[in-house]
Image: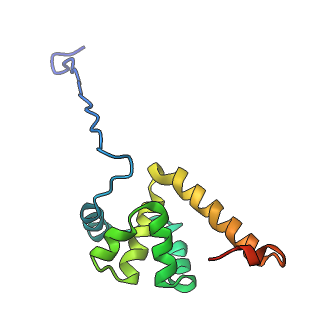
Amino acid sequence: MSADEQDVAISFYIQEIENESENCFNIDEIMMEIDNTEINNDLSIPQMINYHENYTLKGLLLICEYYGFAKDLKNNKCNKEQIIDFLVSFESDNNNSDIVCKRQNMWFYINELKNDKFMKKFVLW
């Protein structure tokens, strides 16, 4: 080891912050994050197009309601584009993959029931 080289010690501290409830979202923070970042995920652009072309505002709010934040989006008077941006951002986050997969499965099952000649009479939605 030369005189210029020194031993360097790196230390860090991780503090876990607990939320009061598991489904606690701060909509204002997430909306600011969406406004300040560009969505670069290649999968997000087709998802945005899908939501824009195939879902009404009511359908998007149903998805948001499933995730537990529709009321906050309604209170902030978000338009369709803002809701789509929020949904794509939420669904692109790996931390939310479990609930996103579950929601997608449930929507698939609903569509299967609606497309069945016998079962469609039991689906109210």
Question: x, y (%) of residue 53?
Answer: 55, 86
Rendered location of residue 71, percent (x, y): 35, 70
Residue 14 in the image: x percent, y percent? 27, 31
Residue 70, quarter of the rendered image: bottom left
* Relative horizontal placement of residue 102, taking residue 88 as reference (left or right): right
* Residue 64 shown left or right of residue 27 in the figure: right
Query: Along the line of sight, which residue is nearer the eye, 8 or 99?
Result: 99
Question: In the rendered image of this protein, does residue 125 appear above or below residue 43?
Answer: below
Residue 18 versus residue 92 in the image, above or below: above
Residue drawn where x is 16% and y is 21% of the image: 4
Residue 105 image position (x, y, % from top left): 65, 60
- Residue farthest right in this picture: 118
Q: Residue at x 29, y 34 (%)?
A: 16
Q: Residue placed at 44% from the left, 68% from the top?
A: 87
**Residue 77 occupies quadrant:** bottom left
Quadrant showing the N terminus: top left
